[in-house]
């Protein structure tokens, strides 16, 4: 028992230190500006989630799929104002994140199906799936499960698998979740008015978004992510794909990201000289690379369609 508590204390201490370092960096976060207004959208037979839908409706659609323990806006808010000048840009809060669906259990395949269900509701026939970290896994699964709906992929700071099924690691995450239930009960719904309030300091806005995801579900989230593994079928991907590699990433190591660039046929690689949170903390580098990737994959999709039309 003492050994188990010591293990939990060690993990909690590490998590605490990581959060404190991240908060310290958020003292002056990337400016929160020109955010699209969102609303709750019901996905028939699945549940309701928070969605933003911005940019010209006649432009190619890009679904931005967020990382674990964030939400659609917190992960992507620096990029959206630049991206929605050229594309129709959609974000959604994934299951058990922000104002996302809270049906158990948590599974990335369900998340991928949610994306396509939202496309159905919005009347979008096909789209680019762009994912950061966990969102990259969801993007890959969206293509795998619905290949006729996903035109292209942009995979950022991600890999073909997450973590491991190691029982000790999963037990530690579950123990953290049980402790966090005391201070962050999973049944408490986020305060929508506070989440939508952009008049507060940027740091306050960012922390409110972060706290909208119940950390008490950490074990469940980790377990759901650990079952993802695209390595057996990466070489079958046959759509335009770009991979943004974060060179200083300590969460998804560089060698794991390189499995994507070494295996996906015809992939285009972009490098960002930043860490795992480069979409926010190194946004000045991340944004132009992502825009280049979006434009390039869109041109590839259009060229492919033109070739088919000529046949």
Image (cartoon, helix red, strand yellow):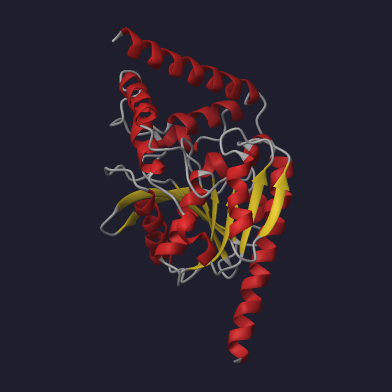
Q: Quadrant of residue 253?
A: top right
Q: Is residue 304 visible?
A: yes
Corner quadrant of residue 61 = bottom right
Residue occupying the far top of the picture? 2
x%, y% of residue 122? 43, 64
Q: Is residue 77 shown to the viewer in this render?
A: no
State the residue at coordinates (57%, 39%). 252
Q: Is residue 289 above or below residue 297?
A: above
Q: Is residue 227 left or right of residue 13?
A: left
The residue that appears at 37% across and 22% down in the rendered structure is 176
Residue 5 located left or right of residue 28: left
Q: Quadrant of the C terminus?
A: bottom right
Asked if residue 178 lies left or right of residue 263, the reply is: left
Q: Is residue 122 above or below residue 171?
A: below
Expressed as whole percent of the image width and height from the top left, the position of residue 63 reads 52, 57
Q: Percent position (x, y) of residue 23?
A: 58, 22
In-front residue for pair 4/192: 4
Q: Quadrant of the N terminus?
A: top left
**Vertical position of residue 289 compared to residue 278: above or below:** below
Total of numbered circles in the picture? 0
Residue lying farthest bottom? 311
Question: Where residue 54 sits: x, y (%)?
Answer: 55, 56
């Amino acid at each position: 028992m003492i050994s188990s508590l010591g293990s939990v204390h060690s993990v909690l201490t590490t998590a605490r230190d990581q959060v404190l370092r991240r908060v310290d960096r958020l003292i002056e976060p990337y400016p929160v500006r020109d955010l699209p207004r969102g609303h709750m959208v019901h996905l028939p037979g699945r549940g309701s989630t928070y969605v933003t839908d911005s940019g010209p409706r006649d432009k190619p659609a890009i679904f931005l799929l967020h990382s674990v323990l964030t939400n659609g806006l917190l992960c992507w808010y620096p990029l959206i104002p630049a991206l929605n000048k050229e594309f129709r840009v959609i974000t959604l809060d994934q299951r058990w994140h922000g104002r996302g669906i809270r049906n158990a259990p948590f599974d990335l395949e369900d998340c991928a199906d949610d994306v396509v269900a939202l496309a159905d509701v919005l009347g979008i026939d096909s789209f680019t799936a762009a994912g950061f970290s966990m969102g990259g896994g969801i993007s890959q699964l969206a293509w795998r499960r619905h290949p006729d709906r996903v035109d292209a992929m942009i995979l950022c700071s991600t890999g073909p698998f997450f973590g491991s099924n190691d029982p000790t690691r999963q037990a530690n995450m579950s123990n953290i979740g049980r402790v966090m239930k005391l201070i962050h009960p999973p049944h408490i719904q986020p305060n929508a008015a506070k989440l939508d309030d952009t008049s507060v300091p940027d740091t306050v806005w960012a922390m409110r978004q972060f706290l909208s995801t119940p950390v008490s579900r950490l074990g469940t989230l980790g377990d759901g992510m650990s079952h993802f593994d695209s390595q057996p079928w990466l070489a079958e991907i046959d759509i335009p794909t770009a991979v943004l590699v974060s060179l200083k990433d300590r969460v998804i190591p560089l060698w794991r990201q390189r499995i994507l660039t070494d295996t996906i046929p015809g992939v285009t690689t972009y490098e960002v000289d930043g860490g795992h949170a480069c979409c926010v903390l190194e946004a000045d580098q991340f944004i132009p690379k992502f825009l280049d990737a979006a434009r390039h994959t869109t041109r590839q999709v259009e060229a492919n369609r033109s070739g088919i039309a000529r046949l």
